[in-house]
Amino acid sequence: FAVLLTDPSHVLPFFSSIFMEKMAGFIKLYFPVFLLGAIFGKVVEMSGLAASIAKTIVRLVGAKRAILAIVLMGAIL
């Protein structure tokens, strides 16, 4: 943002050099985590485990405590 305010002509070189290099490094480093997380999420969804856990938690804490149920589901899954 500071680059845009001080000299708008340097915005493109900033994004193409510094930002893109760091972003590519981040994606290369964490891509396996994102990929395995997506695969795990799809397996949990297709197996029905996520729905089963959700129904059990809602039954235990009650529908009136939906926020607590969501927090617990996020912690478990």
Image (cartoon, helix red, strand yellow):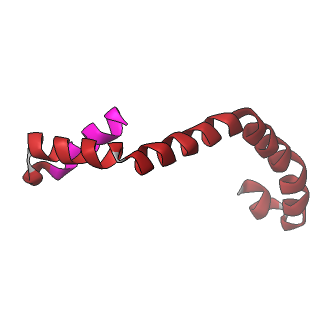
In the image, the segment drawn in magenta is 66-77
Q: How many marks?
A: 0
Res 30 quadrant in image: top right
Residue at 77% x, 45% y: name it.
23
Depth check, front residue: 42 or 29 = 42
What secondary structure is the magenta-colored segment mainly?
A: helix
Q: Is residue 75 magenta?
A: yes
Depth check, front residue: 71 or 55 = 55
Q: Position of residue 47 (x, y in %)?
A: 40, 45
Q: Is residue 74 magenta?
A: yes
Res 75 quadrant in image: top left
Residue at 29% x, 41% y: name it.
73
Residue 39 shown left or right of residue 1 in the figure: left
Depth check, front residue: 46 or 15 = 46
Q: Position of residue 63 (x, y in %)?
A: 10, 53
Q: Position of residue 36 (x, y in %)?
A: 60, 37
Q: Position of residue 29 (x, y in %)?
A: 74, 33
The C terminus, quarter of image: top left
Residue 49 shown left or right of residue 37 in the figure: left
Residue 59 shown left or right of residue 15 in the figure: left
Q: Is residue 76 above or below residue 42?
A: above
The single residue placed furthest to the bottom in the displayed view is: 8
Q: Is residue 24 above or below residue 6?
A: above
Residue at 64% x, 42% y: name it.
35
The N terminus, quarter of image: bottom right
Residue at 74% x, 42% y: name it.
27
